[in-house]
Image (spheres, grey):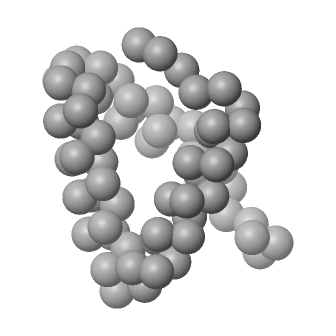
Amino acid sequence: MPELNSHSRDRVYTHCARAVSAAGRESESLFLARLALLLFEQIGDAQACEAAIDAALHSLPAPSLSA
């Protein structure tokens, strides 16, 4: 599976963070679940999607007050 270069990763991360903020606290979980589903459909490989879910869950950063 192709990977993003660091510039593209930063740009996509920033766009996603702004979209989460725009969705608001009340809808952020729903937005993220919907986004994940749309991306999973783009990938089209259930095992790869499940592996990504597991990797994300096991590498969550500690919450930071500086963010």
Decide if residue 34 is on the left or right side of residue 8.
Answer: left
Rendered location of residue 57, percent (x, y): 45, 41
Decide if residue 22 is on the left or right side of residue 28.
Answer: right
Rendered location of residue 32, percent (x, y): 34, 60
- Up-down: is 7 above or below 64? above
Decide if residue 21 is on the left or right side of residue 28.
Answer: right
Decide if residue 49 is on the left or right side of residue 8.
Answer: left
Rendered location of residue 58, percent (x, y): 50, 36
Pick the residue in front: 64 or 12: 12
Q: Image quadrant of residue 15? A: bottom right
Q: Quadrant of the N terminus?
A: top left
Pick the residue in front: 32 or 15: 15
- Up-down: is 51 above or below 61? above
Q: Quadrant of the C terminus?
A: bottom right
Residue 18 in view here:
yes
- Up-down: is 41 above or below 13? above
Residue drawn at x 72%, y 32% is 6
Residue drawn at x 38%, y 74% is 28
